[in-house]
């Protein structure tokens, strides 16, 4: 290998020498893309579905002018949306509105496009304002000419198609425009990038939505049905199905309408049935520049990352962390930090959409998104989705876009599920050095034949499967392994030979009871996901040796050497951590060895004193538990905490420390049967969600205001939950009151932001809050169940009926 590298370097040196000999120039700039210049003219009679958008933008401009007394800064309103949605059209409508022209002394248009060259933009503004060519080249001369043109006039400037994400460039441009800005001047910026809007906007961006079905159909009719005689019922049905495929994108609708208008009606049926029209249109008309322009401006690194999204079925949810881990596994990125940056860029550019955090589970809360359809077109032939319905000759990259593949061409493959047919197709199309195979559905026990064609799997970097093989030692380059939702009860010991493995996912493996003992030698492991592995009995020895580990969602504590909580001491864990079988921790000193207080990346922590199968001693008081909980003090960055089956009588002192828990937004106290008092939860400044379940001994929600350690007695303000939005109280047989009466204090508890209140199985609770309607001003949802003493109070004419009426009015409003 060293000789080969030496030979390669010598060849490179020869090429460099020849390059210098011929005086070639080195250019790092990406190839430029020809962007057509836009203008301000628009035929309003041809525009569909943008009247409301125009009125909103005009109103913003006029209201700002009428209410603004600040002469120093120009208002900047971004208009943001995907390519072809109508940003330029909306800007044109606003530019030509008579109210706008009467209000502003100058109404100017400048097409910026991909190159944000300040001199060119200023020159363009001068030429539009004077209607004369500007030959000035020096920046100072251009600045003086701009001053003369604007002349302290009230102006509206439209900067169309802006791509610049360099804040310094915009700051320079803005200073020029502000220096000659009259009161209430304004700038409209159109862009596909949310980042551009963030940098340039002084107001929130106006986001253009896709056309609804009715508006889409209206636009289509205007461009196709020129004569009433053409509107045949059968033809209309076909046309509406075609329009539906355009998903409300105006440019796509007009492009397809123009194509169909030139074809005989008999051809419309074949267009609809075959779906080939997508390729034909998208590769031969203006829709490609519209959709691919954003892609052309991505870095090569971001392009290859986005292309891998084509492995996911159309409209499916994608896990952000999974994407980044797949990019890492395939050497597309050098670090997960860089992966996060690229993910953000793809979101800003609208390639990844509908980004949201799934909060259904406490421990595992993935960030999900959906991809833009463009991914299937830019991935070329190295990514494929293999479906059971696909023939051997026609493997679908996209369920609606048939693509023909050459033999042994696909490097990244996903399968609906494994069957005898898909295995046969897979062997034919896979590249000899295939990198990624993802199986999304269980294939009824049929395994991917990893050992059958070693050459095809030797280079595999990422594998998602529902079965595991002892032949996995062949996959020595494997970095990502996902066996989630499989029925495996144990991983083969041979898996510990995968020294390059970075990510191991076993989410929802309900039958899994043990992990391979040799896992401590897998030094490359960064992430181990064990969410839902409820039968896992214990951890392998020596987890502490996995010094690259960043994620370990579950850790089962054992009293044996090498399996205790001390194994976590030096691990820099982040995300979520569930500690079970805490009853097996020897002492508080042993618990402190877990070093939770140093884990600043840990955001969600679940502490469980028992395992899923242990039933003994759950209700008995264990004074040792209090010391252990005290020693499990987390870092102040913790955002969510859950205690389950805690057997102590008192909660720890750190749970009384509102400064330590200043970022805690979610708190779950479940089956803490011996605890008689709660910490002063109302002092937690960020608490949004509180759930209390099966606290048998609790009599009062707010008993005492003792968030101090100095022992001094004083009268503190009444409990006040500043940000709490959801509170769930369930199965608390001794709960009688909200606030323990204290001499000299009024028992008032206030929840100014509470929106949802649920009270279940609290039979002794007879009253709610003093001045209930005033203390719950934001309540939208109230659920009272199996609380016999409260039932009458919430009936018509009862003490709390006015709250029920108030909630109804809020929901109607």
Image: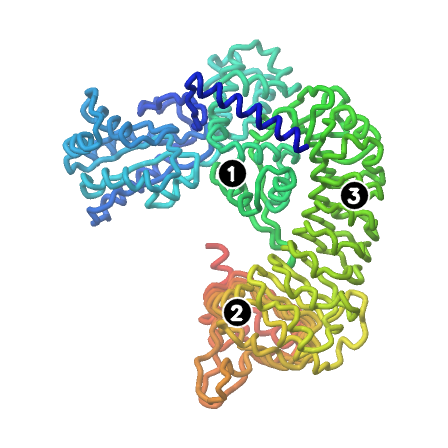
The residues tagged by marks 1 and 2 sit, at their Cα atoms, a distance apart of 34 Å
- Distance from the alpha carbon under mark 2 to that under mark 3: 40 Å
In the image, taking residue 356 as reference, residue 673 lies left or right, namely right
Which comes before the other along the chain, label 3 or label 1?
A: 1
Q: Earlier in the sequence, mark 2 or mark 3?
A: 3
Q: Is residue 751 left or right of residue 168?
A: right
Q: Nearer the viewer, residue 145 or 795?
A: 145
Residue 695 position (above or below residue 323): below
Depth order, front residue of 223/533: 533
Residue at 41% x, 37% y is 80
Q: Secondary structure at mark 1?
A: helix
Residue 683 can be seen in this image: yes
Residue identifier under label 3: 466
Q: Is residue 664 left or right of residue 65?
A: right
* Percent of width and height locating residue 563: 76, 65
On residue 661, which mark appears?
A: 2
Dot 1 crowding, Cα within 10 Å, few <14, some 14–19, many 20+: many
Q: Quadrant of residue 43?
A: top left
Label 1 belongs to which residue? 346
User: SS for tag 3?
Assistant: loop
Q: Residue at x 34, y 43 (%)?
A: 201
Q: Mark 2 falls on what kind of element?
A: loop
Q: Residues within 10 Å of mark 3 (few under 14, many from 20)?
A: many
């Amino acid at each position: 290998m060293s000789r080969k590298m030496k030979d390669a370097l010598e060849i490179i040196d020869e090429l460099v020498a020849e390059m210098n000999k011929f005086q070639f120039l080195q250019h790092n700039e990406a190839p430029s893309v020809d962007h057509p210049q836009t203008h301000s003219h628009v035929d309003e009679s041809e525009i569909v579905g943008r009247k409301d958008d125009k009125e909103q933008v005009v109103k913003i401009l006029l209201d700002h002018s009428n209410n603004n007394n600040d002469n120093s800064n120009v208002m900047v309103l971004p208009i943001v949306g995907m390519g072809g949605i109508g940003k330029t059209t909306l800007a044109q409508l606003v530019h030509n509105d008579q109210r706008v022209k009467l209000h502003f002394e100058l109404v100017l248009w400048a097409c910026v496009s991909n190159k944000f060259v300040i001199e060119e933009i200023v020159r363009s503004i001068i030429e539009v304002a004077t209607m004369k060519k500007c030959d000035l080249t020096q920046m100072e001369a251009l600045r003086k000419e701009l001053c003369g043109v604007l002349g302290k006039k009230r102006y509206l400037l439209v900067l169309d198609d802006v791509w610049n994400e360099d804040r310094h460039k915009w700051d320079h441009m803005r200073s020029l425009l502000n220096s000659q800005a009259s009161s209430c001047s304004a700038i409209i910026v159109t862009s596909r990038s949310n980042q551009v809007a963030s940098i340039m906007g002084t107001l929130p961006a106006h986001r253009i939505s896709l056309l609804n079905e009715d508006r889409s159909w209206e636009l289509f009719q205007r461009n196709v049905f020129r004569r009433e005689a053409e509107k045949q019922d059968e033809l209309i049905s076909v046309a509406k199905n075609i329009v539906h495929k355009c998903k409300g994108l105006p440019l796509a609708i007009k492009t397809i309408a123009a194509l169909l208008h030139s074809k005989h009606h008999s051809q419309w049926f074949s267009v609809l049935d075959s779906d080939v029209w997508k390729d034909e249109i998208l590769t031969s008309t203006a829709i490609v520049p519209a959709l691919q322009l954003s892609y052309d401006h991505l870095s090569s690194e971001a392009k290859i990352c986005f292309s891998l999204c084509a492995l996911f079925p159309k409209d499916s949810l994608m896990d952000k962390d999974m994407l980044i881990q797949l990019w890492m596994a395939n050497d597309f990125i050098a670090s997960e930090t860089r992966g996060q940056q690229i993910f953000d860029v793809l979101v800003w550019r609208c390639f990844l959409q509908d980004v949201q955090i799934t909060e259904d589970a406490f421990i595992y809360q993935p960030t999900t998104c959906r991809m833009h359809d463009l991914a299937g077109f830019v991935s070329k032939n190295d990514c494929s989705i293999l479906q059971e319905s696909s023939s051997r000759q026609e493997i679908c990259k996209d369920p609606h876009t048939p693509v023909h593949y050459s033999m042994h061409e696909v490097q990244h493959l996903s399968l609906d599920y494994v069957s005898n047919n898909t295995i046969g197709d897979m062997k034919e199309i896979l590249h000899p050095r295939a990198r990624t195979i993802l199986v999304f559905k269980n294939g009824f026990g049929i395994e991917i034949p990893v050992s059958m064609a070693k050459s095809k799997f030797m280079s595999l970097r990422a594998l998602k499967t529902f079965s595991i093989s002892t032949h996995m030692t062949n996959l020595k380059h494997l970095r990502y392994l996902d066996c989630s939702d499989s029925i495996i009860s144990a991983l083969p010991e041979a898996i510990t030979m995968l020294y390059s493995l970075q990510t191991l996912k076993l989410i929802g493996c309900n039958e899994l009871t043990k992990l391979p003992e040799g896992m401590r030698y897998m030094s490359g492991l960064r992430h181990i996901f064990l969410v839902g592995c409820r039968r896992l009995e214990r951890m392998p020895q020596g987890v502490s040796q996995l010094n690259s580990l960043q994620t370990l969602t579950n850790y089962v504590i054992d009293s044996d050497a090498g399996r205790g909580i001390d194994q976590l001491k030096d691990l820099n864990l982040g995300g979520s951590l569930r500690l079970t079988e805490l009853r097996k921790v020897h002492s508080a000193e042993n618990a402190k060895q877990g070093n939770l207080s140093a884990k600043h990346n840990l955001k969600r922590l679940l502490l469980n004193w028992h395992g899923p199968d242990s039933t003994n001693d759950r209700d008995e008081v264990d004074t040792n538990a209090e010391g252990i909980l005290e020693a499990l003090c987390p870092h102040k960055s913790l955002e969510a905490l859950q205690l389950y089956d805690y057997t102590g009588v008192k909660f720890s002192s750190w749970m009384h420390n509102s400064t330590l828990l200043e970022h805690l937004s979610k708190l779950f106290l479940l089956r803490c049967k011996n605890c008689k008092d709660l910490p002063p939860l109302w002092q937690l400044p960020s608490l949004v969600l509180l759930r209390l379940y099966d606290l048998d001994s609790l009599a009062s929600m707010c008993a005492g205001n003792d968030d101090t350690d100095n022992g001094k007695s004083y009268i503190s303000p009444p409990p006040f939950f500043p940000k709490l939005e959801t509170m769930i109280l369930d199965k608390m047989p001794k709960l009688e009151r909200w606030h323990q009466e204290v001499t000299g204090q009024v028992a008032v508890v206030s929840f100014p932001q509470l929106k949802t209140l649920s009270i279940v199985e609290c039979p002794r609770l007879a009253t709610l809050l003093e001045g209930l309607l005033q203390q719950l001003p934001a309540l939208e949802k109230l659920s009272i169940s199996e609380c016999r003493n409260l039932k009458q109070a919430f009936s018509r004419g009862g003490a709390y009926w006015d709250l029920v009426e108030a909630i109804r009015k809020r929901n109607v409003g």
